[in-house]
Amino acid sequence: MRQLLRLLRCFRVKCEADLSSWYASSCGVPQGSVLGPLLFVMHTTPLSTLISSCSLNHHLSCTQMTLNFSFLSFGLTSTPA
């Protein structure tokens, strides 16, 4: 059984001390694959282009997207509480 699991891409979930059964993964990109970074760039480039067209600074990583922007405030006053 273990030898078969090595051939297939399988996973299981651990929640505290409990483990689920093994499940075969039918899609996705294996870790360490050359395709991972290539597919990331292909899928995020249109979004990055759109954000840049709005003159917004941004950063995209595999786990998050960050938008950085600033603006001028006109006519706003701050009063100490």
Image (tube, grey):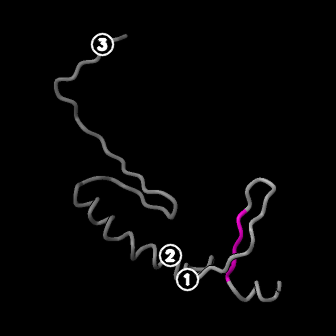
On the image, numbered disc 3 is attached to which residue? Answer: 79
Segment colored magenta? 9-13
Instruction: Count residues near mark 1 (Cα–Cα under 10 Å), then give few for <14, some for 14-19, many for 20+.
Output: few
Asked whether residue 11 is drawn in magenta, I would say: yes
Instruction: Reply above or below: 33 against 51.
Output: below
Q: Disc 1, disc 2: CB below 8 Å?
A: yes
Rendered location of residue 40, percent (x, y): 45, 73
Label 2 neighbour load within 10 Å: few <14, some 14-19, many 20+: few
Q: How many marks?
A: 3
Circle 2 is placed at which residue position? 37
Q: Quadrant of residue 65?
A: bottom left
Name the residue that disc number 1 marks.
Answer: 34
The single residue placed furthest to the top in the displayed view is 81
Q: Amino acid at mark 3?
A: Thr
Q: Nearer the viewer, residue 29 or 12?
A: 12
**In the image, 15: left or right of 2?**
left
Of callouts 1 and 3, the N-terminal one: 1
List x then y, in percent, for residue 32: 62, 78
**Closest to the observer, 22 or 69:** 22
Amino acid type of the residue tagged 2 in the rendering: Pro
| Left or right for 34, reference 53 | right
Residue at 48%, 62% in the rendered image: 61
Asked if the magenta segment contains residue 39, the reply would be no
The quarter of the image holding the N terminus is bottom right
